[in-house]
Image: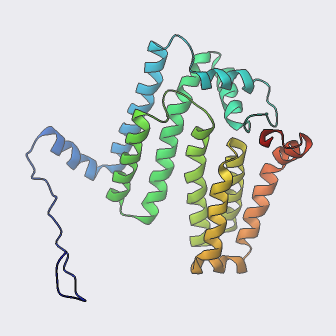
């Protein structure tokens, strides 16, 4: 930056790459034309690789996966450690497949569903190419560490947080009761997954209070419908928490 006082000149470097006509350039050009197909191929590759590799090289289940199957079979409304939704999903997958190795697909599947939801959300607020770059950057994080090769409470939040955010955005943008109620229900599922969801809920609430445009929603039925959907969907677990004297928090 340079210039006289009160005036700033910004020099931006040209970061564009020269096309060499190689395979990488051809792939990039094709991806720019076929955004959805490119993303679908990347996510399919993710599921195949990170489902097959643990099955082939891990003689025993990763600790979280063993815990999923041990606790999920009880189908309780609550547990001393965490909310039950991820454990229910693991047990349901086992009951359907009849093989404990099916739980290896749950982590990669969570990652790709989260990426797809993020892609759909991003398509509504930024240009398609920008959305693809953002989602692929996020996918790189999940391909190499967090979501493989296990499945636990953070994995369901990984799906439910962007889904709630997308529904919340659509509720504010279009004002339809359906989106408000669904946003409340999915936010409740976040609490069925992990209690740290309260930080996300608090963020949404603060946004409704702080943002000048969002505050206008309080003059509609939207936030109250969201609260209704949230309380109805969370009611069984709230009842369990009260009946157990809030055991997980103790």
Relative to residue 150, is residue 140 depicted above or below? below
Q: What quarter of the picture does the N terminus occupy?
A: bottom left
Q: To which quarter of the image does residue 247 belong? A: top right
What scheme was used to colour the molecule?
rainbow
Q: What quarter of the picture does the C terminus occupy?
A: top right
How many marks can you see? Answer: 0
Name the spot of residue 135 as percent of width and height, x first. Answer: 40, 49
Q: Which residue is drawn at 60% across and 44% down?
A: 157
Q: Which residue is drawn at 70% across and 67% down?
A: 177
Name the spot of residue 83 as percent of width and height, x first. Answer: 74, 39
Give 147 or 92, whichever is nearer the viewer. 147
* Residue at far front of view: 5
Compared across the picture, whether 206 is left or right of 166 comes to: right
* Residue at far bottom of view: 6
Q: Residue at x 71, y 70 (%)?
A: 222
* Residue at far top of view: 59
Q: Residue at x 39, y 64 (%)?
A: 126
Relative to residue 232, is residue 103 depicted above or below? above
Compared across the picture, whether 90 is left or right of 76 comes to: left
Relative to residue 29, is residue 217 depicted above or below? below
Q: To which quarter of the image does residue 213 belong? A: bottom right
Compared across the picture, whether 238 is left or right of 225 comes to: right
Give 114 or 209, whichever is nearer the viewer. 209
Relative to residue 24, is residue 90 depicted above or below? above
Name the spot of residue 36 as percent of width and height, x first. Answer: 37, 48
Compared across the picture, whether 81 is left or right of 172 comes to: right
Name the spot of residue 166 as percent of width and height, x first. Answer: 55, 59
């Amino acid at each position: 930056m340079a210039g006289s006082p009160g005036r700033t000149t910004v020099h931006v470097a040209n970061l564009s790459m020269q096309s060499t006509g190689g395979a990488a350039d051809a792939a990039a050009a094709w991806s720019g034309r076929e955004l959805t197909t490119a993303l679908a191929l990347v996510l399919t590759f993710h599921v195949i690789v990170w489902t097959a590799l643990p099955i082939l090289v891990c003689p025993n289940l990763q600790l979280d996966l063993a815990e999923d199957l041990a606790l999920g079979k009880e189908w309780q409304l609550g547990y001393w450690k965490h909310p039950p939704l991820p454990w229910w999903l693991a047990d349901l997958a086992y009951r359907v497949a009849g093989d404990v190795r099916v739980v290896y697909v749950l982590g990669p599947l969570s990652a790709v569903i989260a990426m797809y939801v993020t892609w759909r959300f991003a398509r509504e607020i930024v240009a398609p190419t920008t959305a693809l770059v953002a989602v692929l950057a996020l996918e790189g994080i999940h391909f190499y560490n967090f979501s493989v090769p296990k499945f636990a409470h953070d994995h369901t939040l990984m799906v439910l947080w962007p889904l709630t955010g997308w529904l919340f955005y659509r509720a504010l943008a279009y004002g339809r009761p359906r989106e408000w109620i669904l946003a409340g229900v999915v936010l409740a599922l976040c609490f069925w997954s992990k209690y740290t969801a309260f930080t996300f809920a608090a963020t949404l609430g603060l946004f409704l209070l702080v943002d000048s445009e969002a505050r206008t929603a309080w003059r509609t039925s939207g936030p109250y419908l969201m609260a209704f959907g949230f309380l109805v969907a969370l009611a069984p677990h709230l009842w369990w928490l009260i009946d157990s004297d809030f055991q997980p928090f103790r």
